[in-house]
Amino acid sequence: MRRTLTISIALATVLLVTGLAQERKGEREHGGGRGQYIPPHGPPPVRTPERQAPAQRGAAQERQAPARGNGQERQMPAQRNGEQVRNFSDQPGHPNAPHVHTDGRWIGHDYGRDDPRFHLDRPWPHGRFTLGFGPQHVFHLQGGNRERFWFNGNYFAVAPFDYGYVGDWYWDSDPIVIYEDPDHPGWYLAYNARTGTYVHVEYLG
């Protein structure tokens, strides 16, 4: 009796481990996960005060000010080693990384055109990406890492200031959609349909 129970437990354990491995493999191969929503278009340009008419500036500043007592307070960045650290998890269950809501809102795309971290002396030094933008063009990563990854013979590099948001990407299989960045010349937005997150990337040719 005891031997039969031991064998049954061992068999159940093997089946469970095998099932989990197959599930993980399927997720990697088919892009399963918490994402799967693909934005129909990229983000709109950031509406900075410099781009707005005088009458619009007051309203924009009012929207950016912390609201009080309604649970919608604007999250101020924390500090780490003298640098600001943002929390992008705006709702329960949402990732702490730039991501896109199913209503098409790009959370985290609010850095103005003149933000110094996006400055490139020579935008697009290797030419421009031409395989297509948006949900009609879903590519699968074929190798690499955050410094250099590729698909379909095209190579990209994640912006160093976005390195912290790609730790869970599968560089050999994740479904990726490329969008144009309307605010920062030389940069594109790579959206991961499995994780629902995106980062800034530079085209390497």
Image (cartoon, grey):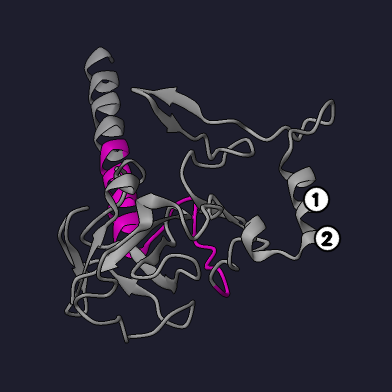
In the rendered image, the residue lying farthest to the top is 2
- In the picture as drawn, the residue positioned furthest to the front comes out as 54
Q: Can residue 166 be seen in this view?
A: no
Residue at image coords 53%, 70%: 42
Asked which secondary structure carries label 1, the reply is: helix
- Give the amino acid at mark 2: Ala
The image shows residue 184 at horizontal and vertical percentages of 43, 65
Seen from the viewer's position, the closer of residues 129 and 167 is: 129
- On the picture, is 120 further left or further right than 44? left
Instruction: Find residue 153 and report its horizontal and vertical position in percent.
Output: 17, 79
> For mark 2, does the 10 Å Cα neighbourhood hold few (<14), some (14 to 19), or many (20 or more) residues?
few
* Residue 58 marker: 1
Which residue is nearer to you in this view: 124 or 71?
Answer: 124
Q: Quadrant of residue 55?
A: bottom right
Residue 92, visible in the rendered structure: yes
Few, some or many C-alpha atoms within 10 Å of disc 1 (few <14, some 14-19, many ≥20)?
few
Asked if residue 39 is among those painted magenta in the image, a careful observer would answer yes
Q: Which of 174 and 15 is in front in this view?
A: 174
Residue 32: name its quadrant: bottom left
Q: In this view, does 10 lie above or below 62?
A: above
* Residue at (48% x, 49% y) in the render: 98
Q: Is residue 125 above or below residue 201?
A: below
Secondary structure beneath label 2? helix
In the rendered image of this protein, does residue 165 appear above or below residue 146? Answer: above
Q: Find residue 55 and name its label.
A: 2
Residue 200's x, y, as percent? Answer: 37, 59
Against 65, residue 40 (above or below) is below
Tell me which segment is drawn in magenta. 16-41
Magenta segment: does it hold 144? no
Residue type pointed to by label 1:
Gly
Q: Quadrant of residue 68?
A: top right
Q: Residue at x 29, y 27 (%)?
A: 8
